[in-house]
């Protein structure tokens, strides 16, 4: 039996969307209020989905405690109450859009999982705005 198990998590973080090689006017034109030089924050909601075959001996796809611990270490501890632009190394070269944050989370979690699993990351920046990343 193949299915997907999910673990939800959340973190609060500040960010600024801007390109240093663009003028303030161009950044504001593209990113609007999200380009505020004093940053702004979100209460991010995260859903991590692991897909694979259920073990017939245990009835588990994955022990969700393992997934919980990976998410805490790789995402919550790394991102929660941080300024993503200034305190998270991955965003020194990436604009911390929801798209890039989901991608970075995927890159941090995937190596910690058994390769037999497929992974999907659903990240809500607001209750109405979210992205899903499931690998390249």
Image: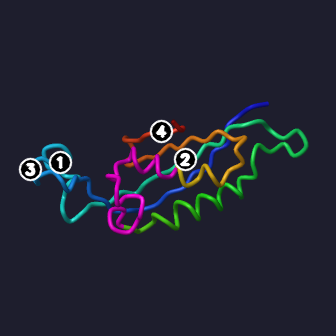
Which of discs 1 and 3 lies nearer the camera? The answer is 3
From the image, tell me which residue sits under label 4. Answer: 132
Q: Say which element carries label 2.
A: strand
Q: CA distance from mark 4 to mark 1?
A: 23 Å
Which class describes the residues within 10 Å of circle 2: few (<14), some (14-19), or many (20+)? some
Tell me, yes or no, whether the two marked residues, 4 and 1, touch with CB atoms within 8 Å.
no
Sequence order check: which comes first, mark 4 or mark 2?
Answer: 2
Q: Say which element carries label 1.
A: helix
Question: Residue most toward the right?
Answer: 57
From the image, tell me which residue sits under label 3. Answer: 25
Which class describes the residues within 10 Å of circle 4: few (<14), some (14-19), or many (20+)? some
Tell me, yes or no, whether the two marked residues, 2 and 1, touch with CB atoms within 8 Å.
no
**Residue 7 appears at what percent x and percent y?**
62, 50
From the image, tell me which residue sits under label 1. Answer: 32
Start-end of magenta stretch: 83-105
Sequence order check: which comes first, mark 4 or mark 3?
Answer: 3
* Quarter of the picture holding the N terminus: top right
């Amino acid at each position: 039996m193949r299915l997907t198990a999910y673990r939800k998590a959340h973190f609060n973080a500040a960010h600024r969307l801007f390109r240093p090689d663009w003028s303030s006017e161009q950044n504001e034109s593209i990113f609007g209020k999200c380009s505020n030089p004093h940053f702004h924050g979100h209460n991010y909601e995260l859903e991590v989905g692991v897909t694979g075959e259920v073990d017939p001996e245990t009835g588990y796809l994955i022990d969700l405690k393992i997934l919980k611990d990976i998410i805490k270490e790789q995402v919550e501890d790394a991102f929660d109450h941080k300024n993503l632009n200034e305190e998270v190394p991955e965003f020194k070269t990436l604009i911390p859009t929801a798209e890039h944050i989901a991608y970075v989370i995927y890159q941090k979690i995937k190596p910690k999982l058994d390769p037999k699993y497929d992974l999907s990351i659903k990240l809500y920046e607001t209750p109405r705005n979210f992205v899903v990343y499931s690998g390249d």
